């Protein structure tokens, strides 16, 4: 039993992430195995669609294996991210219907695998997030393409705070397409196994809609007015000031959350999100994220954030700099410059 289980069931090619004790965290080797599975399914005329799921009941994928990035050198990280981002791009353009089920926790690298899929399913247990500013990193894996396309400023809010989305919020923000209850997932798998040979994307969408349910109201829609008003600025300190002046309980909670994040990562993330708004393609965003990731690993708060969260687990990161006022704009601008050969030629 490997970390990625690949099989064909009827007309369905299945990819199952199989590190449940590690919340199916994505390793470099797993990226290669998934890519090889996509090659296999594309070449097999008997496979009409592909389904991505996670083993265990805790989640699809908690993100990339950040411990390996912490322990490895820049060359390791460059190879990992280069292959991961190419895989994310490939999933977005995959030639056969690709279904991703984000049951349970789906964060970071898990969003990269599922968030760009043609058919994105959440459940009543889903918690989807890009929490990277909390470990001194940045929303990557194409999140700076997805987040700016959420309604209003909700993507800015999600990217800076790392707030988790339930099913309703994930659909509202454009990270998912439908909510299928957990007890209906076996019926979805069975239906996909019976797809016709030349299945179209709409055939799969019809199957999903037949089992989908209304997830109910979500917090993003409920708080959108405050979010749009406070997160419309292009400087993080202006966002902080707007939240401070708002006076609502939601604004106060959000402000407290932002104050826990890496100041440098907040500034970098907002820059990337604003550039993502006018980006011509997903690949353009992935390319920019790649070089910024290398910079943050080499010079930013990433190692300190991982130390506090995963290595020592003291939950007390010592950010450098410690305040927004001390963040040097020239330093952040330097993190946006190319640092290695392009990911996409």
Image (cartoon, helix red, strand yellow):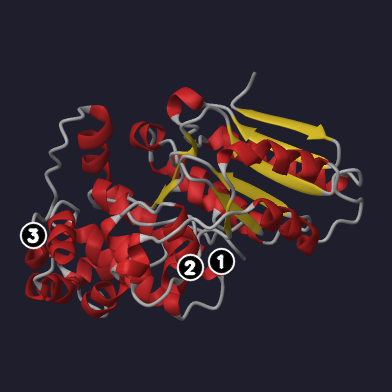
User: Which residue bears the numbered disc 1?
Assistant: 283
**In the image, which is nearer the foreground, mark 2 or mark 3?**
2
User: Which residue bears the numbered disc 3?
Assistant: 323
**In the image, which is nearer the foreground, mark 1 or mark 2?**
2
Q: For the residue labelled by badge 3, is the local secondary structure a helix, a strand or a loop?
A: loop
Disc ID at residue 84: none
Towards the viewer: 141 or 330: 141
Q: Residue at x 37, y 70 (%)?
A: 273
- Corner quadrant of residue 173: bottom left
Is the C terminus in the top left, top right, bottom left or bottom right quadrant?
Answer: bottom right
* 197 left or right of 228 in image: right
Q: Residue at x 78, y 58 (%)?
A: 95
324 in relation to 207, above or below: below
Towards the viewer: 185 or 193: 185
Give the CA separation, mark 2 to mark 3: 27 Å
Q: How many marks?
A: 3
The numbered mark, 3 or 1, whose residue comes first in the sequence reads 1
The numbered mark, 1 or 2, whose residue comes first in the sequence reads 2
User: Which residue bears the numbered disc 2?
Assistant: 145
């Amino acid at each position: 039993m490997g970390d990625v289980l690949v099989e064909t069931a009827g007309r369905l090619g299945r990819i199952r992430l199989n590190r449940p004790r590690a919340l199916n965290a994505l390793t470099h080797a797993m990226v290669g195995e998934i890519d090889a599975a996509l090659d296999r399914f594309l070449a097999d005329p008997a496979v009409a669609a592909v389904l991505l799921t996670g083993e265990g009941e805790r989640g699809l994928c908690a993100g990339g294996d950040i411990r390996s990035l912490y322990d490895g050198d820049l060359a390791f990280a460059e190879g990992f991210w280069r292959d991961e981002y190419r895989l994310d791009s490939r999933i977005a353009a995959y030639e056969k219907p690709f279904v991703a089920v984000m049951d349970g926790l789906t964060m970071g690298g898990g969003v990269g695998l599922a968030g760009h899929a043609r058919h994105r399913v959440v459940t009543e247990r889903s918690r989807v997030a890009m929490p990277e500013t909390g470990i001194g990193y940045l929303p990557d894996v194409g999140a700076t393409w997805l987040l700016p396309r959420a309604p209003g400023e909700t993507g800015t809010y999600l990217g800076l705070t790392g707030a988790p989305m339930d099913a309703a919020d994930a659909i509202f923000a454009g990270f998912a397409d439908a909510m299928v209850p957990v007890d209906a997932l076996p019926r979805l798998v069975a239906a996909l196994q019976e797809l016709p040979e030349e299945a179209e994307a709409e055939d799969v969408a019809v199957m999903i809609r037949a089992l989908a349910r209304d997830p109910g109201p979500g917090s993003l829609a409920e708080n959108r007015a405050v979010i749009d008003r406070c997160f419309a600025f292009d400087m993080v300190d202006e966002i902080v000031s707007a939240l401070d002046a708002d006076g609502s309980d939601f604004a106060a909670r959000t402000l407290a959350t932002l104050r826990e994040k890496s100041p440098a990562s907040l500034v970098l993330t907002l820059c990337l999100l604003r550039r993502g708004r006018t980006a011509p393609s997903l690949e353009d965003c992935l390319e920019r994220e790649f070089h910024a990731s290398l910079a943050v690993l080499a010079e930013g708060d990433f190692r300190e954030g991982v130390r506090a969260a995963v290595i020592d687990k003291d939950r007390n990161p010592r950010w450098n700099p410690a305040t927004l006022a001390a963040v040097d704009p020239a330093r952040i601008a330097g993190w946006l410059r190319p640092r290695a050969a392009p990911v996409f030629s």
